[in-house]
Image (tube, rainbow, N blue to C red):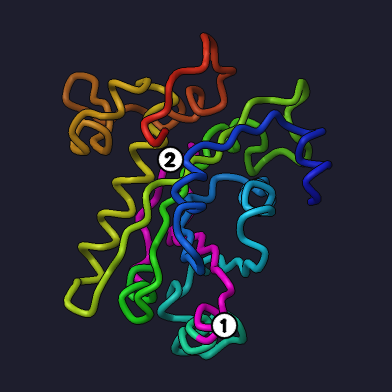
Amino acid sequence: MAGLAIRLAVTPSVHGLEHVKEQGGPFIFVANHPSELDEALVRNALRSVVPRLVSVAVEPRGGIRGLVDQALSLRSASRLSALLKSGTSVLLFAETTRTGDGSLAPLDLGAAALGIRTGVPLVPVALLGTFRALPPWRLTVEPGRPRVSVLFSRPIRAGSGDESSAVTESIAQAIEVGLAEESRGWYGARRSPADVVVPRETEGQPEAGWRRMWKATATPTGPTRRRVWQ
């Protein structure tokens, strides 16, 4: 979907792009993936900053590492490494599954492993509002050009001595902080990561799935708040 089509369908805002502009590429962007709008939104946000970008989505079977073993085209680690070496950035949708309410699912370790292997900075990306604008069961975007946001976190540099699991946790926490701003605001999102990732409970039980989905697709109200990553 071209940038013009995106702007006609939704009202996008981009935050944290200065973290990318401050450094020369390439980058490994690691994003949540709640909607079919996501790739086009990230590409549109980066169009004037990152001229060359390849996107890869984790498959349910085996994740990025499984695809590496199968050596499938651009999805193999050696091919991705070569692309990064040539200056092409990579956008990875690293969730190993899709959640029914648009919340962040566990991330595949392959994104962190690629960052450790190549030394290329990993940039967590949080996509807000896209699940509400175009959930999996809809064929068209919600009317009224709904607000969506693309939030770029500060790059994470991983080295040969780092563990993939620890780097993956850092990426996930950065994405969770961005996602938390929509419901918690700037101050709430700055609180302990433990406060962000633990689901809200009612009488000792996790919040019902239907309620999480209802909240995820509800129309947001109130003024736009200051962003954590600004």
Residue 77 relative to residue 36: left or right: left
Q: Position of residue 212 (x, y in %)?
A: 43, 28
Sequence-first tag of 1 and 2: 1
* Magenta residues (range): 82-109
Identify the image quadrant of the C terminus: top left
Q: Residue at x 46, y 65 (%)?
A: 28
Q: Residue at x 72, y 31 (%)?
A: 10
Tag 1: amino acid? Ser
Foreground residue among 84 and 78: 84
Extreme top residue here?
Answer: 222
Q: Position of residue 213 (x, y in %)?
A: 49, 30
Q: Residue at x 48, y 83 (%)?
A: 81
Q: Is residue 134 above or below residue 80?
A: above
Q: Residue at x 48, y 23 (%)?
A: 215
Count of residue discs: 2
Residue 48 relative to residue 224: left or right: right
Q: Which residue is mark 1?
A: 86
Local SS, label 2: loop
Q: Nearer the viewer, mark 1 or mark 2?
A: 1
Q: Is residue 116 above or below residue 225?
A: below
Foreground residue among 102 and 81: 81
Contact (CB < 8 A) between labels 1 and 2? no
Tag 2: amino acid? Ser
Q: CA distance from mark 1 to mark 2?
A: 34 Å
Query: Residue 87, located in which quarter of the rendered image?
Result: bottom right
Q: Is residue 142 above or below residue 90?
A: above
Local SS, label 1: loop
Q: Position of residue 3 (x, y in %)?
A: 78, 46
Q: Which residue is mark 2?
A: 103
